[in-house]
Image: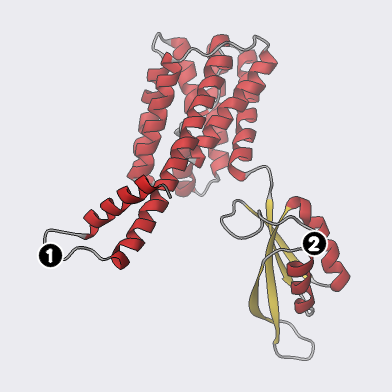
Amino acid sequence: MNSFVSRLLIVIARKKLETNETANPASLKQLLPVVRTLHIELRHAIKEIIFIAIGVVSAGFGLKGFLLPNRFIDGGATGISLLLENLTNISLGYLLLIVNLPFLILGAKTFSVKFAIKSIIAISFLAFVVHNVDYPTITDDKLLISVFGGFFLGLGIGMTMRGGAVIDGTEVLALFIGRKFSMTVGDVLLLINIVIFSFGAYILSIETALYAILTYMSAAKTVDFVIDGVEEYVGVTIISNKHEDIRIMVTEELRRACTIYAGKGGYNQEGGAQEKDIIYTIVTRLELANLETEIAKIDKNAFIIMGVVKDLKGGMIKKKPLK
């Protein structure tokens, strides 16, 4: 840690611990946990700011470099703002703030005030970028505009979400409606965007609406890649009578960490429950075939359960290559 930052965090920690009622200064033992907490919060805050900044710049490039000069639209709150920009003389920067504001108020009530504040800052930054930054117009080819305009817009939305905020408030509405009416977020977003694209077809043209659907698909796929990562991780649960041999194979041959659960088999021809260890490990999709092969070599009747893991934190999976 930088010495200046360390001293600053110590001062802040000391002020947090020492109150007017406390006569004695805080000890080093008391300060260390608070300083460590402050350091983690600072590091995460910087990371979130970087993600949001990259996201806003990318979304601004997608809007002003591709969509806006060619009167294209997108889905969500951005699509509503683009439609209103075509119908009125109001700047897109102001419309982005106006359209997203109700969704952010809903987000503050549904999630947290911190989330809403970060999102307001992100959308305000995007509005400033769209209003003041002159991006070059990249192309007038409609297919390229749809694909790459959606790509940069999706990259911006995804990076902003990585930073714990949104620049398109319809995701908040989708989460809220999904909870109320037992619908998936994807279904709600699809319904919202069908309405937006229908208005786009009526106000602009059917061709523009069709290209807008292509833009939305490109943006949605890019968001998935940014949020989930290019590598898809799979959680694998292995139940086998030869659990110890499989554990040795996973940890020593494949060099992957695993967790062992103590379990009992519910079905046994001889009656009673048979105790056995249950192995849980995580591999990438590319490594899955190799893992299945190695398990089959040990026990071809092993019971294997696989499920997609959205994200990982810590552990050794990203540090050691598969042998």
Read off the residue under disc 2.
291
Q: Earlier in the sequence, mark 2 or mark 1?
A: 1
Residue at the location (45% across, 11% down)? 87
Q: Secondary structure at mark 2?
A: helix
Identify whether 17 is placed above or below 97: below
Taking the image as shown, residue 3 lies to the left or right of residue 234, namely left
Front-lying residue, 113 or 258: 258
What's the residue type where badge 2 is placed? Leu
Rendering quarter of residue 113: top left
Location of residue 300 with respect to 135 vertically, above or below: below
Residue, disc 1: 23
Crowd class of label 2 (few under 14; some 14 to 19; many from 20; radius 10 Å): some
Vertical comparison of 236 with 177: above or below: below
Name the quadrant of the C terminus.
Answer: bottom right
Q: Position of 27 compared to 78: left or right?
A: left
- Residue at left 75%, top 67%? 250
Q: Nearer the viewer, residue 109 or 50?
A: 50
Considering the numbered disc 1 on the image, is that residue within a helix, a strand or a loop? loop
Residue 280 location, x and y as percent? 67, 68
Distance CA(mark 2)–CA(mark 1): 61 Å
